[in-house]
Image (cartoon, rainbow, N blue to C red):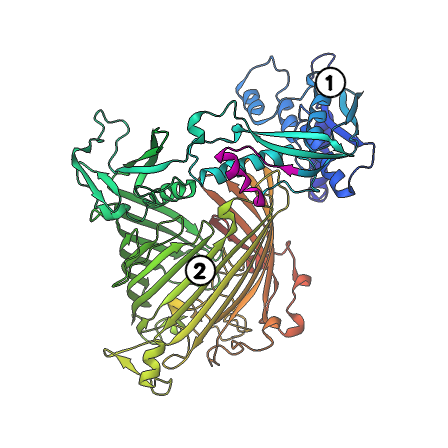
Amino acid sequence: MMLMKKYGWLMIVSSLMTAACSNTKHLPKGDSLYLGANVTLKDNEGSKSYRKVVRRDLEAAVRPKPNSKVLGVRLKLTVYNWAGDTSKKGFIRKALRNFGEPPVLASSLDLESNEELLVNILENRGFFYPRVQSHRETKKRKTKSYFDVWTGPQYRIRNVVYPLDSSQISADIQKTKEKSLLKPGLPYNLDLIKGERDRITKQLTEKGYYYFKSDYLLAEVDSTVDTHKVDIHMVPKHYEIPGQAYNVYKIRNVYVYPDYRINARRKDTSMEQATFHEGYYLIDRKNSFRPVVFQQAMQFKPGDTYNRTEQNLALNRLVTMGTFKFVKNRFDPIDDPANPLLDVHYYLTPYPKKSLRFQIGVQSQSDSRMGTTSSLSWRNRNAFRGAELLAVTLRAGYEAQAGGNTQRPPAFEGGAEVSLSIPRFVIPFIKVVPSSMFVPRTTIRASYDLSLRQNLYLITSAKGSYGYQFREDIRKEHQLFPININYVRTDTLAAPGETTIDYSNLVFNGLIIGPSYEYTFNSQAAGLNRNNWYFDGLADLSNNILGLVQGASKEQPKEIFGMNYAQYIKLQADGRYYLNYAPIHKNNIWANRVILGFGYPYGNSRQLPNIKQFFSGGASSLRGFPSRMVGPGTFNDRYLNSDVTRPRYVEMLGDLKLELNTELRMHIYQFVNAAFFVDAGNIWTYYDDPRFPGGKFTPDFYKQLAVDGGLGLRLDFNIIMLRLDLGIPLRKPWLPEKDRWVFNQIDFGSSSWRNENLIFNLAIGYPF
């Protein structure tokens, strides 16, 4: 048994290597396993880095591709071969073959075709006279292909000439040349030429050439003008361009069909009940929508020149309105040579007006807490014929603790919310015309929440808010709520001395009144790149002006409507950076996050209200520490108080926060991913609090950071991602300063150490 523990991993690796060596056992007679291509550049054209890119791209282009590898082992091929002879049947053999990958045979390698392919790739990159020689080598029934490549000199662009004929379309092409992608000195590249054709076409469609296509442009290349240089002539194919493509179209009429049924026998497209409004006709037989719904979406007016940007803007606003399941449009030309016109038709198929949705989930915490949450939501997507989204949501959750060092009583949370989202700005006495591709929304929301700790306390909260949500573009979003009113009440259920839980830091009674603003930037919304950025910034204020007027202070707190009110300034920033370090798979990512939180309580308040404070620790925070039990500062409820009879805190909160997270995510196989992570951070109070000695923020904050590390397993099923993280503390800030790093205390063989330090987190979705 001891040998198994000591050499277990070695035995597993050895067995995998042995299995890999047998991958040729079941190959057809006379054939061999193909292992891939090796490309060697025999001349020295271009820089070292560019030659590396060329060689990598050529090797990737060779066909067939060899069997895939996992950690250097052809695991899928090994699993496939475990099924044995392909003529043998059986459930297990079939499952192994479906999971595995059949061998890539050397007989499928065609060297001559691959030589032609590599030559073609090089020519498209400006190497006009390449030479490729290939051969294969087979040893022990394994074959590799070898390609020796002489690229020759790479041709570069000398001049780019645009059409000079007398046609109007050629004159309009000439006007776009300042924005050309083809610049003198750049290497010749076929993909760049295709991009230039697309650019010109896009510019022409902005000028009303509705029927023009990039195929109507020809790039004539002259390689005789100079040594290793080319002139490129962009020429319209006048012999292929149809008459319509020469026309600059204007808009005649715009028609909107907001209740169009794709599969209905009767198409509600009759003009008999059309209503003209702000430049467009609304054909709505059932009178389901008010004309104002489409006022911001419709960009074309009669007499406007067709413009593709305006067309995309209209379609995008109709889609992002969230009311219509299908959005499509049609243009009907009126081909009068003297006055070419277009009729525009928008066909909109709405979602079902009303819907009901029920959700239920299960969650667990590392300190033996388990619970369930559920919600019931009713929606009306067109509540008042203005495409408003009216939603009523009921939610409930229950959590209980089965074990652990600090017993917490069962908790119940519930609430209800009513919200109305209007797809336009509703600002009294002001008309705002948005310019982005997205429909702005005005949100009115009212909610009631309660949080009950059995036999301890009951916190109830009633909130009303009014504000706006809008996007600049697909990456940037703003949320401005000038009106937020929140009333919080705490009812004490336990009499003094009846409980071993201290919840005094959670108590708040009064009003929170003030505006909030949140800005979000997400570069990944525009598509995944090698470097991706995310930022979320929040500014939250409460009763700043009222407190100044009344002269509120901690010694002389003021009231409004007979109730206390909170005064604070809260700022929070969440910044993230994602590096896709292996572009061959989207889940190979180095993810990083920094959270900065600053709360300044003043006037009536000595601390932020509990629902506004920061916490640290848990499944999406410091994963090597219990949930919400880190800090503040060097304070630790359990370790710094030897009196076991003294009440323990339910959770720890603070006015300031710093958190740093880094995580290396790796794709292992199909839906299985792994991660290694390190987290650091803490929370602090703004003022001294005698309940939490060492909890105030000081210039030595960096010496008070808690640090953990660990590994995780992620099961990504596309529709849901299950995350399992195992973390351990590496630095405990509550210990004496010289003893805070605890590497030397790690002892996986000790059950008491494991019970104290191994933190298991089960969650859904990534932590950041």
Q: Determine whether, in the image, residue 241 is placed left or right of residue 373.
A: right
The magenta-colored residue range is 160-179
Closer to the camera in the image, 371 or 494: 371
Question: Looking at this rendering, what residue extends furthest in the bottom direction?
Answer: 555
Q: Is residue 248 above or below residue 129?
A: below
Q: Is residue 170 magenta?
A: yes
Q: Is residue 34 above or below residue 51?
A: above
Q: Amino acid at mark 2?
A: Tyr
Q: Amino acid at mark 1?
A: Glu
- Report helix, strand or loop for mark 2: strand
Badge number at residue 519: 2
Residue at x 34% of width, y 70% of height:
514
Residue 652 can be seen in this image:
no
Residue for badge 1: 112
x and y percent of residue 10 in the render? 73, 39
x and y percent of residue 581 in the render? 64, 46
Locate the N terminus and report the quarter of the image it occupies: top right
x and y percent of residue 282 in the render? 23, 40
Q: Is residue 174 above or below residue 592?
A: above
Q: Residues within 10 Å of mark 2 (few under 14, many from 20)?
A: some
Q: Determine whether, in the image, residue 212 is placed left or right of residue 566.
A: right
Q: Residues within 10 Å of mark 1 (few under 14, many from 20)?
A: few
Q: Is residue 637 above or below residue 200?
A: below
Residue at x 33% of width, y 35% of height:
326
Residue at x 71% of width, y 16% of height:
107
Q: Quadrant of residue 434?
A: bottom left
x and y percent of residue 243 in the render? 43, 26
Q: Is residue 241 magenta?
A: no
